[in-house]
Amino acid sequence: MNETIQQVLVAAAVLGAVLYLLLRGRGKGAGKSGCNCATKKSPPG
Amino acid sequence: MAESIQVFRSIAIAGNPNTGKSTIFNLLTGMRQKVGNYPGVTVEKKTGRFYGSHGEVMELLDLPGSYSLQVRSPDEAVSRDVLLGRVPGTPRPDAIIAVLDASNLDRHLYLVAQFLELEIPLIVALNMVDVAEERGLSIDLLALRDRLGVPVIPMVASRGQGIIELKQALSRATLHNSDRKAQLPIVLEREVAALSRILKCHSGSVRPEAMLLLSLEDDRLAAEVRGDTALLAEIHAARERLKLSGLDPIAAPVDARYAWVSEVCASVIHRRGEDSHGLTFSDHVDQILTHKLWGWLAFVAMMALMFVCIFVVAQAPMDWIRAGIQALAKWAGAHLPEGDLRSLIVDGVIGGVGNVVVFLPQILILFFFLGLLEDSGYMARAAFIMDRLMSRVGLHGKSFVPLLSSFACAIPGIMATRTIENRNDRFVTILVAPLMSCSARLPVYAIMIALLMPASNVWSKAGVMLCMYLLGILAAFVMAGLLKKTLLRSETPMLLLELPPYRAPVVRGIVQRMWERAVIFLRRAGTVILALSVILWALLNYPKPSTPDPTPSETLAHSLGGRMGHAIEPVIAPLGYDWKIGIGLVASFAAREVFVSTMGQIYNIEDADEENEDLRTQMRDERRADGTPVFTPLVCLSIMVFYVLAMQCISTVAIVRRETNSWRWPLFQIAYMTVLAWIGAFVVYQGGRMFGFQ
């Protein structure tokens, strides 16, 4: 594979990862935190 | 489109905590649920729709669990306000489903007594009748229906029993208010009626509002009337009149309701199966499991067994996953042309994500055990044992459940602190909750223990892991004690705990929760961890050194990540860490398990020319410049202690910010935990060296 194509793909992957982390916090409702916890914990009962 | 559907009846589902409300809510609504927040408070509002017996659309609102309408926490306030029709955007329900635990009917009927005063049609879902039966309680349903004057549906919600009957009851064309309720003293009734006439209530029923205002404590009353001095004066005058006639306006209605509850219970509950001392099977088991000494031993033994299983049972599946990931990396390495793209995929993506995914079996076993302990009813006993310790540091008994949830993840734990009514107690719990070892630390502990004692038996490994968990608990208690004495002073409240009877855990439910966990873990590995791994890979590979054909070590040292590691080396050198561990520490401030993936990436880059090796072997072979191993037993212990105590989770920071409504507390939390972690690791490493350990 051409080296330039490789570099473009690598740059796209890194940029995509940065954008994903930056934008994932937006527009989320209460209780969604993106952690590895239970998605929602309603009050007991 | 859904909004245009005509709703036949809006129903609220309410009851004491742990009665199975949410189970019934889920049974009725299935997947048709909506979760939001009540305006102005961080209390979750869960609504859903379902079809009645004749296809009519019903709207169901799941109210937070509460013990009475005399509220003590934000959760309980929401329940009361919804039932009184005070919440904007949430109309007063047409009917209430009161969910009661049949095995604790005497305690749960108090809330029913208050519901009957609300003048809203009521349907009683008498849940857990199987447990009541096992406990030797026989409940006369006809008599109960007669005494309450409302439909009573016996249910076993965990098995879906009684749900059809409940739907049928809800689908009746008309539902009536009951005319049976606790008999209040006549003078009190008269004052309630008089106050009702004065109240200009915007919505809902006036009488329950008047009843509530008359029986509130002074400070809460002032908050309720919101500056309406004329109304306040009327209420005070009414109270004075009541006092003159020998009645305590706060205690009188409570006494009347309890008297009514005792009367109802006496006529509907028949006990059998108790031994000559009146003790049930659960009581006998509790004599051991809540004993001052045996209770602790049993607790530690159970935890130890859990960790042994984590090591033994998870070994084989972990080896399979590891072999699969290595094979995948080998295959990708062989099929991709040499260059940065191959390095990104093999070292960054497969190395980074794969090294985290390997720990899935251990995390699932942890959740299997937690589910088992919770479902069997043991958790409440653990809370009881822990309360003796917690009350010594002034921590609220209710803090135990949030702290226990934090073993899985600090976030549900911190959200569960909403049940703690005292602000200072709640903040103390939030501030110490991340000290409990969450499941994201498991990969770090596991890899460090594998390096620390490669040849030891599983009991020793489990022992070390148990010590890490206990260290977290100890640190949480000590910090809570300090915070309660300094920044967040308040009285130590007493614990009121309900010990449910022991029951056989429902394996299906536990397996379902494990499945949910697996999905959450893998989703996180495929999104956040993947993105972080890609960024880390870039940080560890760029900028490239200008020298032609640099060695992998030169590339790493010259990279941005390498420079960051070198920059913090002076700070972490006293803890025994080199700059590469430093990169792991910095990277894992986003999420703890990223430490493992960082180490995987660093050693993959460095050993690029070698055959794909297991991360543990790579770490074990790592040497300092003088030829001594990097990961000595002391360094491994020091790293584990650092991870027990450090606040390394962006998601937790965000949730603390939301729950405390300020940046002050999360920043304070990061600062104190980082300092604590540094001191802890320093003491372990330098102290160990002083005693001649390596």
Image (cartoon, coloured by chain):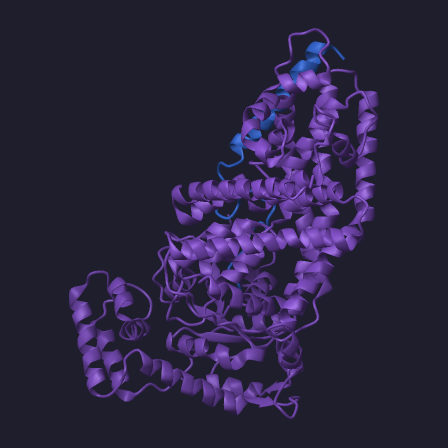
Chain colours: A blue, B purple
Percent of width and height locating residue A32: 53, 45
> x, y (%) of residue B314?
78, 50
Percent across and percent down for residue B642 are 59, 42
Using the rendered image of the protein, determine whether residue B423 is visible from the camera's viewpoint.
Answer: yes
Residue B223 is left or right of residue B164, and the answer is left
Q: Residue at x 52, y 67 (%)?
A: B387
Q: Position of residue B590 (x, y in %)?
A: 56, 36
| Vertical relation: B656 (above or below) B609 | below
Residue drawn where x is 37% and y is 61% of the image: B490
User: At 32% from the left edge and 83% from the top edge, which residue is drawn?
Assistant: B252
Q: Looking at the picture, tell me which residue is in the foreground, B77 or B95.
A: B77
Q: Quadrant of the C terminus of chain B?
A: top right
Q: Nearer the viewer, residue B512 or B57?
A: B512
Residue drawn at x 60%, y 28% as measured from the top left? A17
Q: Is residue B230 left or right of residue B250?
A: left
Marker count (numbered): 0
Nearer to the camera, B357 or B613: B613
Q: Is B580 displayed left or right of B108 in the figure? A: right
Question: Which residue occupies the extreme front position in the image?
Answer: B691
Viewer can see residue B4: no
